[in-house]
Amino acid sequence: AQSVTQPDIHITVSEGASLELRCNYSYGATPYLFWYVQSPGQGLQLLLKYFSGDTLVQGIKGFEAEFKRSQSSFNLRKPSVHWSDAAEYFCAGALRDDYKLSFGAGTTVTVRA
Amino acid sequence: GAVVSQHPSWVICKSGTSVKIECRSLDFQATTMFWYRQFPKQSLMLMATSNEGSKATYEQGVEKDKFLINHASLTLSTLTVTSAHPEDSSFYICSASRTSGSYQETQYFGPGTRLLVL
């Protein structure tokens, strides 16, 4: 079955430090992959997406993600976090011929001063 | 661009009543709209997929008679929770996307509707 896994439930990082959120996928073929961010009580905002081509994807708010086929991963990174980056982050995948998104369980990011 | 709105943003209702939630794509025509449910501290679970002008496709375990979905136009989909009960209390989120040929575009999410059934 297709699935997306986020191994880290909660990550705490200091403001200004780098951040990496892990995402692994299990699909029969290379899926479309997405990272979304959700602030408390809000809907989801698309940070970036990977469909094909360059495996390093740039997104909004200074985020980037790297698709690694050999590791079935699509990890999200940010070189220097800001207090406003504290939120819930969801990785999601979809088959290329099926538009349904499967979400990971999410990773809560806490930013300490 | 690609803005999706939901109304209301939150609603409190008595057990046994029905609640309608609207999802609108404001600046694009949404061929497909999706409805998700999110429990506290949990991920989003897809409830159903609706295509404009046709019946919604429900995910396994979702009661179609309880969660009525209508996608009457390319910019509006509604979710009606019929005879709501406390266990229906949740955060309901819609998303919308366009289809270009066989290519399904990115889903854009609404801000969500928090439902509390007393």
Image (spheres, coloured by chain):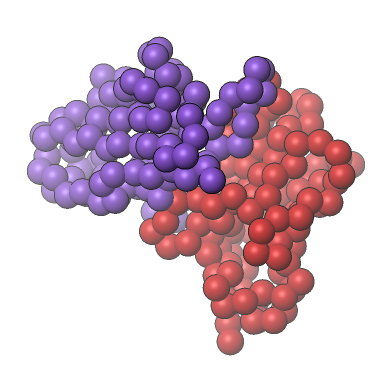
Chain colours: A red, B purple
- Does the rendering let one see residue B101? yes
Which residue, as the protein is rendered here, is positioned at the far right? A70
Q: Quick check: B7 left or right of B118? A: right
**B39 vs B56: above or below:** below
- Does the rendering let one see residue B36? no
Q: How many numbered badges does the structure rendering display?
A: 0
**A86 vs B48: above or below:** below
Quarter holding residue B21: top left
Which residue, as the protein is rendered here, is positioned at the far bottom? A113
Tell me the residue at 75%/42% (across/down): A50
Tell me the residue at 50%/57% (across/down): A38
Q: Locate residue A74, reporting x and y percent.
A: 76, 48
Quarter holding residue A26: top right
Q: Locate residue A45, reporting x and y percent.
A: 54, 52
Query: Camera-side residue: B117 or B18?
Result: B18
Q: Locate residue B15, reporting x and y percent.
A: 12, 40
Tell me the residue at 62%/31% (across/down): B105
Query: Camera-side residue: B108 or B45?
Result: B108
Quarter holding residue B74: top left
Q: Locate residue B72, reporting x and y percent.
A: 33, 20
Tell me the residue at 80%/42% (across/down): A72
Q: Quick check: B27 left or right of B88? A: right
